[in-house]
Amino acid sequence: MHGDLQKIQPVPSLTVFQATAIKTWLLQQLEARPEGMVLDLSEINEIDTAGVQLLLMIKREAQARSCSVVLDSPSETVRDVFHLLGLSNELQQAGQPDSDCDATGRHSGKGP
């Protein structure tokens, strides 16, 4: 599904307390993978708006470099925060449709 892009997994906590270190790490990972990468978000158990900003930043940085960053397998925590911020479509555009969202990206009320 994601071609030859390498899958990497960030630390399980994407918050303001780790923001500087995570930003540096994400940019290093992108630099080492000029074709792009897949970020496996399945183990993220804590994320705040700083973490969301980092994920959106790395996607935009990849676009500027003409490569791709795919936000893959977002945990329930990640999906919930993106939904609360009205950003569910960012996960959908990343190739991970949210089965609990309708076609507009709004929570459908289905699911757990």
Image: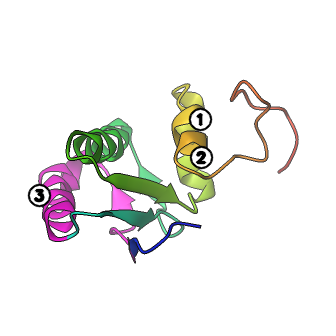
The answer to whether residue 99 of the structure is visible from this angle is yes
Amino acid tagged 2 = Arg
In front here: 13 or 71? 71
- For image coordinates 11% across by 58% down, the residue present is 24
Q: Is residue 42 magenta?
A: no
Separation of disc 1 and disc 3 at Cα? Answer: 25 Å
Magenta span covers which residues? 7-32
> Which mark is on residue 24?
3
Q: Secondary structure at mark 2?
A: helix
Residue 35 to residue 94: above or below: below
Amino acid tagged 3 = Thr
Which of discs 1 and 2 lies nearer the camera? The answer is: 1
In front here: 84 or 70? 70
Amino acid tagged 1 = Ser
Q: Which mark sits nearer the N-terminus, 1 or 3?
A: 3
Separation of disc 1 and disc 2 at Cα? Answer: 7 Å
Instruction: Residue 95: give x, y in percent of width and height.
Output: 58, 51
Q: Which mark sits nearer the N-terminus, 3 or 2?
A: 3
Quick one: quadrant of the N terminus?
bottom right
- Density class for disc 2 (Cα within 10 Å; few <14, some 14-19, many ≥20) is some
Instruction: Residue 74: give x, y in percent of width and height.
Output: 56, 57
Instruction: Name the dominant secondary structure of the magenta segment.
Output: helix
> Which mark is on residue 79?
2
Q: Secondary structure at mark 1?
A: helix
Please report contact status of discs 1 and 2: CB closer than 8 Å, yes or no: yes
- For image coordinates 72% across by 26% down, the residue present is 106
Residue named by callout 1: 88
- For image coordinates 14% across by 63% down, the residue present is 31
